[in-house]
Amino acid sequence: MNSNKILTVTSRAASIIFHPLLIPTLGFLLLFYSDFYFALLPWNVKRFLLLVVFISTCVLPAISILLLAYNRKIDLAMDKTSDRILPLILSSIFYYIGYLIIQKLPIFPVFNFFLIASILVQIALLIITMRWKISAHSAAIGGLLGGFFALSFRLNENPVLILIALILVSGIVGTARLILGKHTSWQVYSGFLLGFLIMNLVILFV
């Protein structure tokens, strides 16, 4: 296996592991195992939250995308911006359903804030995608990093290991999308900045 093929395979693996549909679940897992005060939830509550987030932000959007793929006009690879609009609309709806369920629970509001911000990122991606192809992968990981930066400032905590890990993953994801030719550098940078700013501002000021 030559070096180019190794890079391609590695980039595809990184794109799957850190797919936008998996980032909210990853984010909640990191929140649960951080040193922030709200991580001290009973395991049964954490398990329920994780289940709601995984189903509403990953399973249901993934099923809807697979169903849409039966339409020959929609390419599952979503290389065209037109292929991304309907999945983004459906994902936003499912995200909101997850938010409505979690909102009814007597838990710390930060978990609601994360989902609200995630919904706003989805809506922003939808609006931009109508005119220009932007990296959803970069927006997702950038949003997660922005959310944790905001929490560190708001709570005066320093989750240094999580921040370093997310910075490294952000670089890996962005590089992977470039190697695979899915986006230009501007599309990757713009997606990252969009996700970072929305999540950061919502967590800081809501």
Image (cartoon, rainbow, N blue to C red):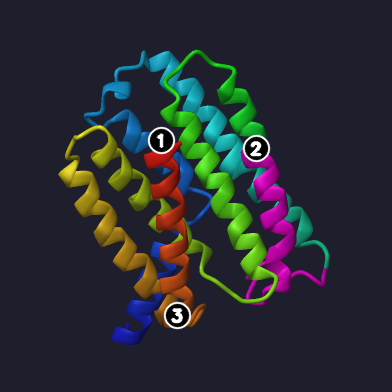
User: How much space separates mark 1 and mark 3, taking CA atoms?
Assistant: 29 Å
> Which residue is disc 3 drawn over?
186
Q: Magenta includes 19? A: no
Looking at the image, residue 126 lies above or below residue 183 = above
- What is the quadrant of residue 171 in the picture? bottom left
Instruction: Find residue 95 and report its horizontal and vertical position in percent.
Output: 62, 40
> Which residue is disc 1 drawn over?
28
* Mark 3 surroundings within 10 Å by alpha-carbon count, few (fewer than 14), some (14 through 19), many (20 or more): few
Looking at the image, residue 198 lies above or below residue 85 = above
Which mark sits nearer the N-terminus, 2 or 1? Answer: 1
* Mark 1 surroundings within 10 Å by alpha-carbon count, few (fewer than 14), some (14 through 19), many (20 or more): many
Q: Is residue 72 left or right of residue 79?
A: right
The boundaries of the magenta stretch are 72-95
Instruction: Identify the amino acid type marked 3.
Output: Trp
Q: Is residue 13 left or right of residue 97?
A: left
Element type at mark 3: helix
Which mark sits nearer the N-terminus, 1 or 3? Answer: 1
> Which residue is disc 2 drawn over?
96
Which mark sits nearer the N-terminus, 2 or 3? Answer: 2
